[in-house]
Amino acid sequence: MISTSDFHNGLVFEDEGHFWQILHYQHHRKSQAAAVYRVTVRSLTTGSIAEKSYSSGSKFREVPVTKREKQYSYDEGDMAVFIDMETYEQVSFPKSKLGPQARFLRENMQVLGVYIDEKLTDIELPANVVLTVVSTVPGVKGDSVSNMVKPATLDTGLEVQVPLFIKEGDKIRVDTRNCEYVERVKE
C-alpha cells in the first residue's frame, strides 16, 4: 500500500478499480484545514486525463509496472502497430488511448510499452522528438520584440508555435508531453 505522501510524477496506482498515472501533483494545506493533494492523473485504461483531490493519508494499492522496448511500425486503421524488441511479435495499440501523442509517431521510433499484470496498458514516447518544418510563414526582418512566435506545420501534420527565425526545411526538437518547440537542431 502507498500513501499520498508517496506521490511522485509517473507513479501508477489503483483507485476505485481504475489504474491511474500521476502527471502532476500539488500538496495544499490551509491554516486550519486538513492537507489535500491535488493531482492531475491519466487513466491507463481509457487514456483520459482527470483532476482529483485526495486527503492526506489516503491509502492506495501500488501497481507493479514493467516496461519493455517497442518500435513503432505502421498504422492500421485506428490502431498503431508496434514490434516488441524482445520477442519480435507485433502488438496493436489503439491510437485513441495515445491521445495527442499519436501525432508524434514516426516509422522505426523507439518507445516503451507499459505493462500492468502482463497486459499492455500504455505507450511512453521519448520526451523529445526531432521533426522537420514543412510549412511556415517567413519571419519579417525588423520584428525584434522578444519571444515572437509563428505557427509551423511539421512533417507529421502537427502544428506548433516556433520562433521567427525558423524556416521551412529546418529540423526542430519538440517536447512530446506538451507539444511545444524546444530548439532548432543542426545536422
Image (cartoon, rainbow, N blue to C red):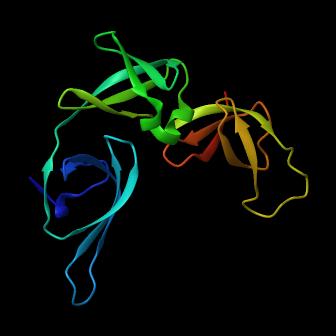
Residue 144 in the image: state x and y as whole percent. 83, 61
In this view, the residue farthest toward the bottom is 32
Q: Quadrant of residue 168?
A: top right
Image spot of residue 116 (x, y percent): 21, 34
Q: Nearer the viewer, residue 104 or 43?
A: 43
Across the whole image, how many numbered discs are drawn on residues?
0
Farthest left residue? 1
| Point 46% across, 24% down: residue | 79
**Position of residue 2 in the picture relative to residue 107 (left or right):** left
Q: Is residue 3 left or right of residue 68?
A: left
Q: Is residue 83 above or below residue 124?
A: above
Q: Residue furthest top?
A: 88
What's the residue at 84%, 44% (across, down)?
137
Instruction: Please tell me in which quadrant of the rendered image residue 172 appears.
Output: top right
Q: Is residue 46 above or below residue 112?
A: below
Outermost residue on the right side: it is 141
- Left or right for 19, reference 102: left
What residue is shown at x 46% (from left), y 36% (from top)? Answer: 96
Q: Is residue 150 above or below residue 105?
A: below
The quadrant of the image that shows the C terminus is top right
100 or 94, which is in the foreground? 94
Q: Residue at x 40, y 48 (%)?
A: 48
Q: Is residue 18 left or right of residue 172?
A: left
Residue 151 picture location, percent across and down: 75, 47
Provide residue 159's location: percent of width, then percent of height.
68, 42
